[in-house]
Image: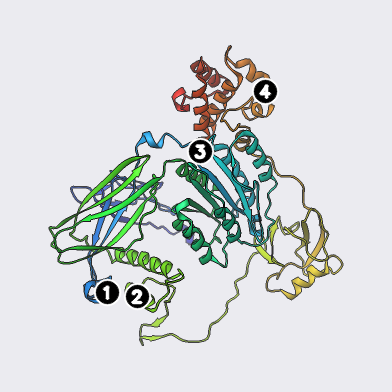
Amino acid sequence: VPASLVPYSLSFSAQVSSPRPISKIESSCSLEPLQYLNADQTQATVKLGAGHKFDRDVELLIYYKDAHQPSAMVEAGQASAKPGHKSGSLMGDPVVMVSLYPEFPQSVMSSLTTCGEFIFLVDRSGSMGSGMNHKTSQSRMDSAKETLLFLLKSLPMGCYFNIYSFGTTFEYIFPNSVKYTQKTMENALKKVEEMAADLGGTEILQPLTLIYSQQCIPNHPRQLFVFSDGEVGNTKDVLDLVRKNSDSHRCLSFGIGEGASSALINGMAKEGGGHAQFITGTERMQPKVMESLRFALHPTVVDISLTWDLPKGVSATVLSPPIKALFQGQRSVIYSQLSGKISEASEACVKVKYSLAGHPCENQLHFSLNPSGNTGLTVHRLAARTLIHSLEMKMREPSGMDNDAKRKVVKLSVESGVNSSFTAFIAVNKTTNKVIQGPLVRRNVPTAIHDIEILLHSSMFRIYGEPETAYAACPCSIPGTKKGNNKCVLFFLLENKCDYSKSKSFHNYCVNHSDVFPKISHLKKYKDPPQGQSELHELSKLVSLQKATGCWMLDEDLAAVLGKTKEEVEKAKPGEVKQEVWTTILALIWLHSFKTDKKAEWELLSMKAASWLNDQNASRVPECVAAGNTLLDSSVRKEDLGI
């Protein structure tokens, strides 16, 4: 019987435990009804429904009640380990994990700041010419340029901005940050359109140094957005520079693709009091970046402090670094080691105080010191990882390296089983209890020739097309190839024989590096790359037509995006209504009706447009919305548009 016809079934159940009551659990797969295991609904069991056919991943979405309330979990120490106050160990004492997931007042979140200095630092190294992923032809550079379009259109009037780009060298659009106006926005977008992945390597320290050397603009907090898809050889120097200037700015960093350095991206955000995001797989860059811009436009949380109220004889040693930033919808976790005599009935309280938009705020969390059940020392290991990272960061400072700190890291790493920069995992034969030794063996893994990146003369090539018509493109010239616009495109066929008559230097490089080019053999021809770029898709086209103030003006391009002619749009306009008011309402209706799946990308510029409309005190707005719905065959309410 063929294997595919053999009957089979799959049983799956999961027990969910949470400090907060579990509201519901959803899945794209069929689930049996949720069963709670205790009265407070903090533990539950969920089972996969009958008939699952392995046609999709089993994913569970768990919803919690009071998700934004602080929560705490106390984990008992390892029974075989000595208490920390005697041995300097972490594993023998209880550890508490406090989770903060703040939700700020709607009155604060709905009002975006109109001030700030927004600086965008974009990677233009050769690898940015690679595709975002294997399923799309859009390059990382093109995606970054489209993202800059959305960013620039979403900035508030009255703020300041500038754009820097870097590779082996760096460039900037303006010598200093300029005030955001229609003219400066248009000038910046023209420069953005000309950007290419043509600046070589990845050297970010020099442009950062220049940015930090410029004086901050009074009453305009500096927000630095960093985009990179690679790594640098001087990560320590970069992070030290960000830390040195952490009081004068907030850094929000984005790692593009699987090759982005997590040490660089996470480190810059952490040292700069911001947060990091990574764009991998088939994810789009725009939603994550626009979410970060929304954070940057919200009032900054300042004066963050943490205090503990513990039973007599119990003390807490905070293992996490001080919290520098709190964001709506972003979780912050604090680990603390408890020492002293703790009774199961004891309770504690942790208070988090901060200032938001000039108003003092306080969150209090009362929790039991009775440890949770068998958690496998997960909280201890997470705390150990946090403490190890903090110690390693401190040791990178000029006066931070000392043998005592190193010994502490090694001891903590060995006891917890969490790796560090001074330790490593080794293989041990369980039978003999001896370390496995022997020579390292190299294993060559064959790589498909399609859709791969190859490095040639420090320039990134990318293979495009099918085997019969494949070609490679690079941002610089190779000796012996035709030059044009500082680019060359090499067309080749994947055959068994080489053609020496086309480009001997390229062929010789292939021969000398056959491990890199095992199948590139016949160089057919080469010529200049195709000129121009593909047309912006309709959403980007609409965004590109928006003015800096937030409104839209009527022209043939806008009408085309709306699926109408200019005459049809003019004819449908209610009388005595300004044309820009009418077209702005139409643009908002179109966004809310036909691009709801991309709302995270256009929501900020939509709010900006709605704010402009509200400032106009225009008459007959309800009539315009009704006429717009009729014209565009939609059903959007006036309230949905924010007007």
Q: Nearer the viewer, residue 473 or 307?
A: 307
- Residue 389 image offset from top left, x and y in percent: 40, 66
Q: Residues within 10 Å of mark 4 (few under 14, many from 20)?
A: some
Measured Cα–Cα span from mark 2 to mark 3: 50 Å
Q: Pointers 1 and 2 in contact (CB under 8 A)?
A: yes
Measured Cα–Cα span from mark 1 to mark 4: 76 Å
> Picture quarter containing residue 230?
bottom right
Residue at which label 1 appears:
88
User: Residue at horizontal 68%, vertical 66%?
Assistant: 455
Q: Upstream in the sequence, badge 3 or badge 4?
A: 4
Which-is-in-front pick, marks 2 and 3? Answer: 2
Measured Cα–Cα span from mark 4 to mark 2: 72 Å
Which-is-in-front pick, marks 3 and 1? Answer: 1
Mark linked to residue 565: 4
Mark linked to residue 297: none
Residue at which label 2 appears:
408
Q: Upstream in the sequence, badge 2 or badge 3?
A: 2
